[in-house]
Image (cartoon, rainbow, N blue to C red):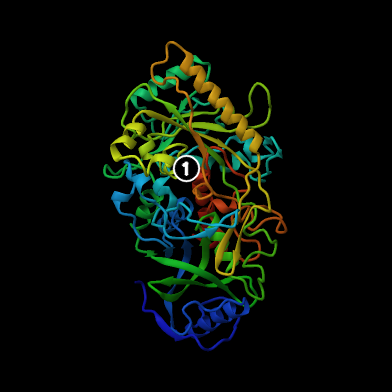
């Protein structure tokens, strides 16, 4: 630990407004308790001591996924004193990149959290609470958003959002993100790929032999499959690229970095004016702590970051901190994802990563001129946590079949993911019911997604009818199923960025409009829902926000 904590009894309640500089421990504790009292929230763990970390950091970051993990590496390397609060603890290597039937036997990657879903019933979200966050299971596919997606992309139910940012604003940060995360790819292989100022930093990864054959089969049908850009780590034991390896490990090389794991952030506490965050309250091993920093960054994910702000309501921020616009929690988006299975003519291992992507229908098809989405080869069924969460057929039989039969099915299946974007809707939102997290999440753009699913089904059948095809074969059925609400790894939009404080939570730099030293650097700030996935865009934005924070701190 960087400094000795002081303990303050939590009985006294006062609300000082201390301009600038450090806040004395007793006043800080009193202000924190006063804030919780003003919001009608009982102090968690009331009756015990409130520990205060005496050191004041340059930057405090909440969450260590694609945004937070990337950010701490940048800031620590700049010589700043950085504290990272991560709710989870280190994920054992045996639990990373699981590639066996255990994915179906156990509910992996469900940390015990329970939320209320759109139907009013509780559900357990699939997410990773550990250093690296959901990047521990993201499969390593990192693609740039397409240029058209930044400004009113034509969609079936109307135009997509205007990001105000343009692709050119993010292009240099995309380049840096690809270099940092060691992305292997091939420029020019995808017709919808946006302009690049430099090639990929590394050559594309080879496909599995049967994937190469499948690629040839698709090419014969006039389609344009390309090798997906993949982040690959440097460790032989854990070759997948994630935010722990490329962000936290980088930060750990510098003395100013400190990680506190097992730290659940409960609330942010502001000055009496409400214009600054004065302290971050967290629970560690059942004990409440207060931490201080000149700049605070939320990067806990689209749901958790919104929840922290909503739980930080005070008289100055009655709807939640930084929520004068009433936009915190609104515009929750998850791409529509449908898993589809095809019968393989070749027995394979069922244990391989994603390899092929297709954007032939990204901007429509021969009948419509609005965006439909993208298709990806899902990788081996036994190495896809998302598929294990929502398999179209294996979910029905996986608990009944013996291990050998389940593996036999997986070794003879080819999986595809069909993905379509959704539009922001203010009624799709994260809210609180007491201490319970409630998600209203009704997908839109449904007709476009259904069209893409049936379009891809026709492609699958067309490939199978080709006498030259050797990889897949005809089947009486094509099992498919949509990813359930529990799949939250691609969620975005709940704290959207924009220049208008009445319609957004953060400005175009990622700083909250209403709180001068509060930033957000995760998927929650994305105004739209990239059909190619938000991963690389979150990383690029985190690098951009880190640069702005360095300027703010004169570094």
Tally the numbered discs: 1
Q: Is residue 148 left or right of residue 103?
A: right
Q: Residue at x 63, y 74 (%)?
A: 314
Residue 182: which quarter of the image?
top left
Q: Is residue 517 visible?
A: no
Question: Residue 137: where, in percent of width, then height?
Answer: 40, 46
Q: Nearer the viewer, residue 66 or 92?
A: 92
The residue beneath circle 1 is: 390
Residue found at the very far bottom of the displayed protein: 12
Q: Nearer the viewer, residue 406 or 134?
A: 406
Q: Nearer the viewer, residue 134 or 413?
A: 413
Question: Residue 480: where, in percent of width, then height?
Answer: 50, 34
Question: Residue 45: where, in percent of width, then height?
Answer: 46, 79
Q: Residue at x 48, y 62 (%)?
A: 62
Question: Residue 524: where, in percent of width, then height?
Answer: 57, 53
Instruction: Label 1: state its secondary structure.
Output: loop
**Image: 221 above or below 414:** above
Q: Is residue 353 visible?
A: yes
Residue found at the very far top of the displayed protein: 467
Quadrant, the N terminus: bottom left
Question: Alpha-carbon neighbours of circle 1 within 10 Å: few (<14), some, or many (≥20)?
Answer: many
Residue found at the very far left of the displayed protein: 237
């Amino acid at each position: 630990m960087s400094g000795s904590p002081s303990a303050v009894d939590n009985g006294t309640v006062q609300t000082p407004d201390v301009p600038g500089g450090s806040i004395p421990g007793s006043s800080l504790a009193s202000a924190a308790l006063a804030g919780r009292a003003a919001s009608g929230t009982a102090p968690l763990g009331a009756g015990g001591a409130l520990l205060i970390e005496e050191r004041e950091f340059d930057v405090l970051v909440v969450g260590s996924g694609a945004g937070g993990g990337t950010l701490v590496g940048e800031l620590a390397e700049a010589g700043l004193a950085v504290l990272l609060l991560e709710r989870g603890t280190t994920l054992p290597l045996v639990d990373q990149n699981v590639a066996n039937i255990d994915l179906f036997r156990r509910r992996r990657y469900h940390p015990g959290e329970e939320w209320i879903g759109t139907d009013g019933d509780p559900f357990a979200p699939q997410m990773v609470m550990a250093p690296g966050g959901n990047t521990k299971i993201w499969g390593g596919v990192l693609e740039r958003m397409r240029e058209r997606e930044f400004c009113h992309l034509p969609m079936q139910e109307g135009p997509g959002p205007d990001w105000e940012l343009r692709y050119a604003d993010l292009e240099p940060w995309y380049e840096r993100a690809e270099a940092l995360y060691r992305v292997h790819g091939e420029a020019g292989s995808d017709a919808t790929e946006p302009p690049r100022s430099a090639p990929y930093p590394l050559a594309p990864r080879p496909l599995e032999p049967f994937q190469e054959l499948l690629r040839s089969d698709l090419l014969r049908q006039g389609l344009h499959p390309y090798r997906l850009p993949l982040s690959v780590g440097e460790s032989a034991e854990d070759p997948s690229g994630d935010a722990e390896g490329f962000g936290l490990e980088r930060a750990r090389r510098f003395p100013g970095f400190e990680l506190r794991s097992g730290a659940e952030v409960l609330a942010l506490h502001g000055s009496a004016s409400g214009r600054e965050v004065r302290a971050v309250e967290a629970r560690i091993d059942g004990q409440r702590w207060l931490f201080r920093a000149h700049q605070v960054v939320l990067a806990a994910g689209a749901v958790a970051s919104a929840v922290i702000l909503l739980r930080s309501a005070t008289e100055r921020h009655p709807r939640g901190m930084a929520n004068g616009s009433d936009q915190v929690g609104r515009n929750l988006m998850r791409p529509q994802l449908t898993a589809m299975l095809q019968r393989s003519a070749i027995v394979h291992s069922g244990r391989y990563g994603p390899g092929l992507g297709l954007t032939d229908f990204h901007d429509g098809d021969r009948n419509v001129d609005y965006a439909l989405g993208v298709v990806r080869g899902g990788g081996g069924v036994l190495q896809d946590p998302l598929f294990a969460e929502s398999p179209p057929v294996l979910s029905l039989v996986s608990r009944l079949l013996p291990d050998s039969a389940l593996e036999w099915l997986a070794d003879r299946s080819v999986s595809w993911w069909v993905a379509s974007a959704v539009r922001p809707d203010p009624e799709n939102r994260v809210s609180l019911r007491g201490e319970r997290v409630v998600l209203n999440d009704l997908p839109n753009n449904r007709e476009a997604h259904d069209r893409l699913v049936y379009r891809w089904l026709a492609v699958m059948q067309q490939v199978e009818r080709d006498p030259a095809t050797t990889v897949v074969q005809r089947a009486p059925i094509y099992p498919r199923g949509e990813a359930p609400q529990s799949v939250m790894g691609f969620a975005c939009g709940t704290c959207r960025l924009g220049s208008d404080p009445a319609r957004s939570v953060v400005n175009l730099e990622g700083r909250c409009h209403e709180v001068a030293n509060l930033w957000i650097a995760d998927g929650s700030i994305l105004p739209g829902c990239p059909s190619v996935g938000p991963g690389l865009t979150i990383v690029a934005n985190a690098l951009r926000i880190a640069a702005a924070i360095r300027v703010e701190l004169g570094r």
